[in-house]
């Protein structure tokens, strides 16, 4: 503990009393242009340590009181155990709900993806059928023209060629 200049200056009687009784020793450490440094050493407290109050006497407990305390402790233990089990059951229930929701979302996603795939396949099938029908129609037209040209060629006299 260090006493500052403020304490000594504000209460000169205190510092004189402490110095005269030998309870305080001041050593000058450093003297510079910027100021001085002191070390203040306090003597050990003359009063000694504060005695601890005597321990309180424990009152004798009857068998009934001990039994009541044991029963109360057992009730607290059971109550705590029930609370922990309830908390675990709630946690399990929540986990089940989360898993159920995840499975439902997965099933919904699968169904949606399957429906989209079926729609695309159906659209592709219809497009292919339409293209094939268009090609068949085009080939029929060409065959018709070829047949007409062939018939026209056969009906023309050979000398005109």
Image (spheres, rainbow, N blue to C red):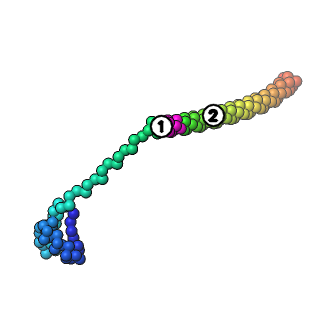
Of the numbered discs 1 and 2, the one sitting upstream in the chain is 1
Q: Neighbour class for label 2 at 10 Å: few (<14), some, many (≥20)?
A: few
Asked where in the image residue 102 lies, by quadrant, the reply is top right
Contact, mark 1 vs mark 2 (Cβ under 8 Å): no
* Position in image of residue 95 (x %, y %): 58, 35
Q: Which mark is residue 64?
A: 1
What quarter of the picture does the N terminus occupy? Answer: bottom left
Closer-to-camera residue (99/17): 17
Residue matched to label 2: 100
Asked where in the image residue 5 lies, by quadrant, the reply is bottom left
What quarter of the picture does the C terminus occupy? Answer: top right
* Position in image of residue 9 (x %, y %): 21, 76
In the image, what residue occupies the spot 47% across and 37% down? Answer: 64
**Residue 149 shows in the view:** no
Judged from the image, the secondary structure of the residue bearing numbered disc 1 is helix
Alpha-carbon distance for marks 1 and 2? 53 Å
In the image, what residue occupies the spot 52% across and 35% down? Answer: 78
* Position in image of residue 53 (x %, y %): 30, 53
Judged from the image, the secondary structure of the residue bearing numbered disc 2 is helix
In the rendered view, does 55 fall on the left or right side of 29? right
Magenta part of the chain? 70-80
Query: Where is 161 relative to 7, above or below?
Result: above
**Residue 90 shows in the view:** yes
**Magenta segment: does it hold 151?**
no
In the image, what residue occupies the spot 19% across and 76% down? Answer: 12
Asked where in the image residue 137 lies, by quadrant, the reply is top right
In the rendered view, does 54 fall on the left or right side of 109? left
């Amino acid at each position: 503990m260090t006493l500052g200049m403020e304490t000594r200056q504000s209460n000169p009687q205190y510092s004189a009393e402490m110095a005269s009784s030998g309870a305080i020793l001041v050593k000058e450490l450093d003297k510079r242009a910027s100021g001085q440094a002191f070390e203040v050493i306090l003597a050990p407290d003359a009063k000694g340590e504060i005695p601890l109050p005597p321990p309180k006497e424990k009152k004798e407990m009857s068998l009934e009181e001990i039994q009541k305390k044991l029963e109360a402790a057992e009730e607290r233990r059971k109550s705590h155990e029930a609370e922990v089990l309830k908390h675990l059951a709630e946690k399990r229930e929540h986990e089940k709900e989360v898993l159920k929701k995840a499975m439902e979302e997965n099933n919904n996603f699968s169904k949606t993806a399957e429906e989209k795939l079926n729609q695309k396949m159906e659209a592709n099938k219809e497009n292919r059928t339409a293209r094939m029908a268009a090609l068949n129609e085009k080939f029929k037209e060409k065959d018709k023209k070829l047949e007409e040209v062939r018939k026209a060629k056969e009906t023309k006299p050979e000398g005109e060629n």
